[in-house]
Amino acid sequence: MTPPPYVLSQGVLVAIGNALSQAFAVGIGTSHEANKPHHEARPCVPSIRQRSKAQRPSEGHARTIVEGRWGMCEFTCKCANSIQSWNPAVLGLLDSLPYDEEVVVWGRRWIVKTSTLGERHGYGVYACEDIIVEDSTSCRREGPTLFPYGGPIYKRRHCNMILRQHPEWKTFALEMDTFAGSTRRHSDVRVIDGDPIRFGNIAGFINSTVGTRPKRKANCEWVFVKGPPPAPYGETYHEDHCLVLATRTIRSGDELFTHYEWN
């Protein structure tokens, strides 16, 4: 006798249908999470601290190439950021100084040629006109202004850093803050890079009286001046500066000498 066919109840059929629908939905990736609304991805905006760090140039990769006296010099890292350009015209100086030719600087005529000390001392500066210094017993003798000691100004630590990277880089560094009452630290003392070749600084050709044979007498000196130079140069240059003053009468054809020692 054949048994009667098994008939599923309505509840069982509903349960099986629900199970199959869930299994089918998972298989094609249509879970209930897929029905949630999607939000567009926002770009990650760095904080102010992060942005300032990202925009700051890396000192380790800084690099600059400038022309030195004996060719091109490459400076890197902090030196690359310290090297300054200089326009001699802001102080009334010439871009370049020709040798054995008269030039006019600050209204006076000068010539740069071989020093009377001999060829091993290089060039010297000669007056092409008389410069009279009046003696005075009532006050300290101050002669007329000849010209400025010009060039870019560095702090001493920056100047030393440049020379450590390129010892052949001639700076002709003249200290500005050696006057009485200066409170600057030694590393913060300002120095002028007065190289006459690169910066047209005619004062850089003045030779020292130290060790000269026969002994030369100084006829000029450089002094620190707080504030801008006299007109019309003060209209384009507004910084502290150094000037070269005559200390005794200079005749046409005399070479300029002052007293200084190289460190």
Image: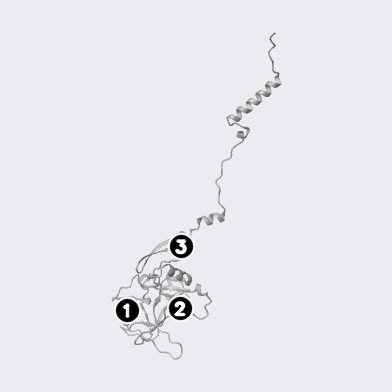
Q: For the residues marked 3 and 2, what is the alpha-carbon distance in whole angstroms?
A: 32 Å
For residue 131, above or below residue 13: below
The quarter of the picture where the N terminus appears is top right
Query: Mark 3 or 2 closer to N-term?
Result: 3
Secondary structure category for the residue under label 3? helix
- Circle 2: is it few (<14), some (14-19), or many (20+) Cα within 10 Å? some
Q: What residue did someone put label 1 on?
A: 120
- Relative image position of residue 133 (x, y in whole percent): 38, 86
Query: Mark 2 or 1 closer to N-term?
Result: 1
Which label number is shown at residue 77? 3
Dots 1, 3 in contact, CB < 8 A: no
Dots 3, 2 in contact, CB < 8 A: no
For residue 251, above or below residue 13: below
Which label number is shown at residue 224? 2
Secondary structure category for the residue under label 1? helix
- Relative image position of residue 213 (x, y in whole percent): 34, 86
Which label number is shown at residue 216? none
- In the rendered image, is residue 106 in sight? no
Q: State the residue in front, 12 or 74.
A: 12
Q: Which quadrant holds residue 105?
A: bottom left
Of circles 2 and 1, the one toward us is: 1
- Relative image position of residue 158 (x, y in whole percent): 47, 69
